[in-house]
Structures are given as structure tokens and as C-alpha cells.
Image (spheres, grey):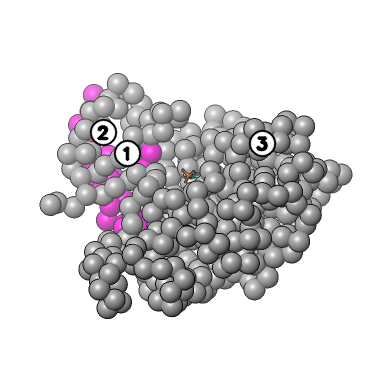
Amino acid sequence: MSTVYNFCAGPAMLPPPVLAKAQAELLDWQGQGVSVMEVSHRGAPFIALAKESEADLRELMNIPDNYHVLFMHGGGRGQFAAVVNNFLGNHGKALYLISGQWSKSAADEAIRLVGESQVDTIEIVSKVNGLNKVTVPDFSVSSEQYRYLHYCPNETVNGIEMFEEIDAPWPVIADMSSTIMSRPVDVSKFGLIYAGAQKNIGPSGLSIVIVRKDLLELPIVNPSSIMDYRIAAQHDSMFNTPPTFAWYLAAEVFKWLKQIGGVAAIEGMNKQKAELLYQCIDHLPFYKNGVDPQNRSRMNVTFQLADEDLNKVFLADAEAQGLVALKGHRIVGGMRASIYNAMPLEGVQKLVDFMTDFAEKHSA
Ligand SMILES: *Cc1c(COP(=O)(O)O)cnc(C)c1O
């Protein structure tokens, strides 16, 4: 089998050493003669895994002690609902910043659950010189009493990223599904961070929640127990059976990331990969990207061919060379190369070489 580089936005590629290890111990985990999928989550071996993975994540993200780390079900969208159920209920209002598809979906879910009267939204992306640019309002002058502000630092579909943390007088909740652990963040600036696992953490279904402990003391309505952060925290994420295999793989991804130098090291590699690809797009008139350089995503690089009639040929030729899943999201069109932590520099180099050749071949 020749090397395939998988640019899928999610579920995304996992580090090959992690998959190889999982394969090697699939039938016999820790000498027990059974797989990790077949043992009790309440047994000592799995509890040790859970503890170690939490410690590794805390170390990787430098998570302060006054935060819980929860391993929950339901991916990113599960948390769209959980956030509302835990913090909004039928009390007060929340503010949602809209920067693209996912933050819009999160706001839509909030409105679905509690109605428009409790949910304010602000569009923070506008066209400046023809490019999508994020402008965050100055919240220090606001007299509103929001329960929380929700935003999405990396819009996976639109290829828009915000690199600066938001200052607001309310707890800030961030959907980091597609940027978590790709670069250091100051966790102490957030009330809650969540992420569906299938981009930078592990397989789909699992979600990670990092929540400041004092927020769980707020008066809340009764969320369903499976969504309740307090119950999850009280039970060390084992109120019900957690997605144990996904958790095991996430634990292996954390170990892998630590081994290659942690989040600061991967940030260096991620910058290098993204720069390589954006340089190619900028230097060839054959391609274009519609995002302001300050907000260009390091994880999801969107681009269009100047001649959209060539989209199909581009995708077919790329696939023939082992460069797969480059088709853009249907609502944005064009192409999208998702280059999460697990994508090696060689994969991006190969894509850039292909794009350069393709442009040459099809330029009149
Ligand atoms: C992928 C993604 C989601 C959705 O995750 P699901 O696990 O499919 O619910 C939500 N937010 C962002 C930013 C994403 O990239």
C-alpha cells in the first residue's frame, strides 16, 4: 500500500504510531488476554488509564487545578446542548459570537432549547478588502449580565481562526473541537473549553470538557444526568459507561504528543505546515483563499481553484497520488486541506508539490 495522506476534516487521521500500538494490543491489553474494549471501566487497569490520561492532558494544556477535566459522550454537538442545559436553563441570557458554521450551529441549538429571548448573537466576521476578517467587540463597556459568552476559535468549515483569547466580563466558553492542543492556550482565561475528539484527540463520540470548578456552583436547572457536568465531575466521568475505546485511543494520542515535545513543539510544526500551504496558494494565481492573513486557520486550509470547472479533475488527480479528502465543505465549496496535529510535514509538502504541478499543467 503506498502512502496515503488523509486531509479529512473529521474524523481525521490519527498518528500512525498510535494506531500501530492499538493494533498490537487489540487482542490482549496489558496481559489480560482481552481487549481494552472488554474490560470494566471500574476495574483498576482502566481507572489507571483514565487517571494517567487526565494527568497527561493537564500537563499538555497546562490546566490549572481549579478546573475539572471531563471525558463525556456526544462529540461537539453534545456539548452545544450540554452548555445550555448546565448554564442557561430558563435563567438569564447567553451571548453567542458567530464566526462561521459551527458557532452558528451552537447558537441555533441554544435557541432551539431556550428560545430567542435568552440568546443574543453577534456576527464577528465581515469582509475587509474582500477577505473574511474577525473583529471582536470591546465587551468591557457592556452592561449586559450574560451567563456566558460562547465562541468557536477555529471554524473548521470556513477556515477561520482566532488566535487571541477573548476578554469579557462573563465566563467564556469555547468550542475548540478543531484547534485543541494545536497551540498553547491560556486555560485560565476560559470558563469552559470543550472539544469533540475526532480532530486532534482521537475517535469520534468522545468529548473533552475542561470547566472551572466554581462555575458548577451556579444555580442551575436540572440537565439530563448524562449531560450534567456536576454529576460527571462527582463520578470522575464514570457516572455511566464512558466510551472506553475512544478514551484509550485519546490517552495514546496524549502520550504521543508528549513524546514529540508537547503542545509548544506541535505548534511549531503546525505553523510550518500552514505557512507552506498558504505560500503555495498565495504565489500561484491558480488558487485563492478568502480569509484575512490574521485569521487564516492553521488546521483547516480552505482554497478555491480560479477555474472551478477543474474541481473534479483536481480531486481525482490528487486522489490518484494518495492525497485524499480535499473536497471543501458543501456550504463553502472549493477545497479544504485539514492539517491537524497528526498530519506530517511530508503530507503537506506532497500536497504543495501536487498543487504546483497541477497549476502548471492547467495554466494556459
Ligand atoms: C467537528 C466539529 C463539531 C461537531 O462535532 P460532532 O462530534 O460531529 O458533534 C463542532 N464544532 C466544531 C468546531 C467542529 O469542528
User: Could you tell me the amino acid type at mark 1?
Assistant: Leu
User: Could you tell me the amino acid type at mark 2?
Assistant: Leu
Q: Tag 3's secondary structure?
A: helix
At which x and y percent is residue 34?
27, 69
Residue designated by label 3: 113
Q: Tag 2's secondary structure?
A: helix
Observer-nearest of 339 and 37? 37
Point out the tag, 2 or 3, that comes first from the N-terminus. Answer: 3
Q: Are marks 1 and 2 in contact (CB under 8 Å)?
A: yes
In this rendering, the count of numbered labels is 3
- How far apart are the two marked residues, 3 and 1, measured between alpha carbons? 34 Å
Give the left or right position of residue 229, taking residue 92 as reference.
Answer: left
Observer-nearest of 210 and 320? 210
The image shows residue 71, relative to residue 316, as above or below, that is below
The image shows residue 224, relative to residue 15, as above or below, that is above
Q: Nearer the viewer, mark 3 or mark 1?
A: 3
Say if disc 3 is inside 8 Å of ligand 1. no
Give the left or right position of residue 262, taking residue 317 as reference.
Answer: right
Q: Quadrant of residue 97?
A: top right
Residue designated by label 2: 315
